[in-house]
Image (cartoon, rainbow, N blue to C red):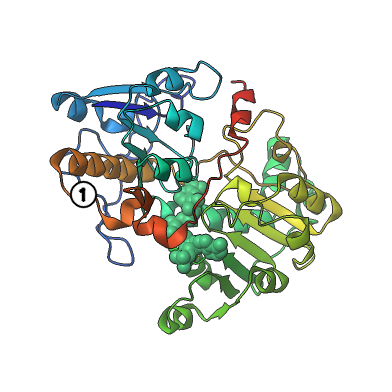
Amino acid sequence: MKILCILYDDPKDGMPSSYPLKELPKLEKYPDGMTLPSPKGRDFTPGELLGCVSGELGLRKFLEERGHTLVVTSDKDAEGCAADKELVDADIVISQPFWPYYLTRERIESAPNLKMAITAGIGSDHVDLQAAMDHKIDVVEVTYCNSRSVAEHIVMMILSLVRDYHNQHRIVNEGGWHIADAVKRSYDVEGMHVGTIAAGRIGYDMLRKMHPFDVHLHYFDKHRLTPDQEQALNLSYHDSVESLVAACDVINISCPLHPETEHLFNDELISKCKPGAYIINTARGKICDKDAIVRALESGQLSGYAGDVWFPQPAPNDHVWRTMPHHGMTPHTSGTSLSAQARYADGVREILECLFDGEEIRNQYLIVQDGDLAGMGAHSYTKGTATGGSEEAAKFKK
Ligand code: NAP
């Protein structure tokens, strides 16, 4: 089989010759008891860069020993890009949400051999799921592999936005010592109302991690948590997004992007937020109307916005979120720490081993199977596509 793998570029000065840590902590299971990815073999050292082109997700030896062809590229957007050329006879495409190869209907229809799209990470909205269903292409992702990495990033972003860390760090870098400037937008998180849209793996872990900060915790989700889960963190449940945003000083977004959540945070919903609220979005950029966020930061309706997800990706160099006031944006990094990379590289290999050996892929990894939403996909996604406008990614210049 031909496996096409689209990964982000290597570091500008080449692959590291050493890393800060000698080894990663050993984790056995996720909090709900699900086991970590467990491939039969591994050809990389956990803690090394695997998500970039030279890292190859640690797959080359394994695939070539089994007689498969692996093509790896980062060139994925402009017309005539390497990924489009290689796609036409590819059997499997592996892509990452951090550097997504937007598998639009047009691309899917250019690839008659395509059988499977694997997301090396979580969130398969870069695939036109409707087109995948129509063409019986299975879509799978490595559920849970980086959920807890993202929850850590959310906590970092809540604290840094509310305490105004970025501004204070900038003052130091510029050689200053202007305490009043450094603290004129700086608050304690303690006592605030912190809520999440979706309390899935990431959302619930974020609530758990914020609990020791002595805040009031809230959530909205399509399915209510168990009484035990609510009581453990003293959670207030809201039966609508509107109710949650009116109550919270800090609003976290952790739902998948699908037609139901696209542009959920528009002018209307933002106007219902508690004035001066902070929004953290590590789910997907398109869940927010980009210009509505800018307007709200400029008017003061929002005090801050942080996240690591943009639309499209890479974000064009003139994307307004790069320059809007009071933002704490990073590139899409929360789920691709060196720790997370080891887990999703293992997960991709586990999926490929199952496919090649005719074994069942874990139900939790399935998004689309046999022409319909399946597994996790049937639980959390709705039919349709959210890839519209992705061609804008070609505007990014390195
Ligand atoms: P998850 O465990 O599947 O949780 C998703 C939750 O969203 C589920 O609880 C689901 O509800 C809920 N949901 C779905 N549609 C909703 C809606 N319309 N309104 C409210 N809640 C809704 O997945 P996860 O691991 O937490 O990941 C969540 C998302 O984060 C992913 O889909 C991806 O987009 C994003 N993500 C980002 C990164 C990153 O690097 N920034 C990494 C991983 C994931 P039910 O289960 O009750 O249906």
Front-most of residues 48 and 110 = 110
Front-most of residues 310 and 93 = 93
Q: Is residue 156 above or below residue 323?
A: below
Q: Is residue 81 above or below residue 19?
A: above
Q: Is residue 335 above or below residue 9?
A: below
The residue at which mark 1 appears reads as: 38
Residue 307 at x, y percent in the picture: 60, 48
Q: Inspect this view and state whether residue 275 appears.
A: yes
Residue 24 at x, y percent in the picture: 30, 46
Label count reads 1
Q: Inspect this view and state whether residue 205 appears.
A: no
Q: Residue at x 53, y 69 (%)?
A: 221
Q: Quadrant of the N terminus?
A: top left
Q: Is residue 285 left or right of residue 368?
A: right
Q: Quadrant of the C terminus?
A: top right
Q: Residues within 10 Å of mark 1 (few under 14, many from 20)?
A: some
Question: What kind of element bears circle 1?
Answer: loop
Residue 147 at x, y percent in the picture: 42, 55
Answer yes or no: disc 1 within 8 Å of ligand 1.
Answer: no
Q: Which quarter of the figure has residue 264?
A: bottom right
Q: Residue at x 23, y 44 (%)?
A: 350
Which amino acid is tagged 1?
Ser
Q: Is residue 237 left or right of residue 45?
A: right
Residue, far right: 299
Residue 369 at x, y percent in the picture: 33, 49
Q: Residue at x 36, y 32 (%)?
A: 93
Front-most of residues 337 and 115 = 115
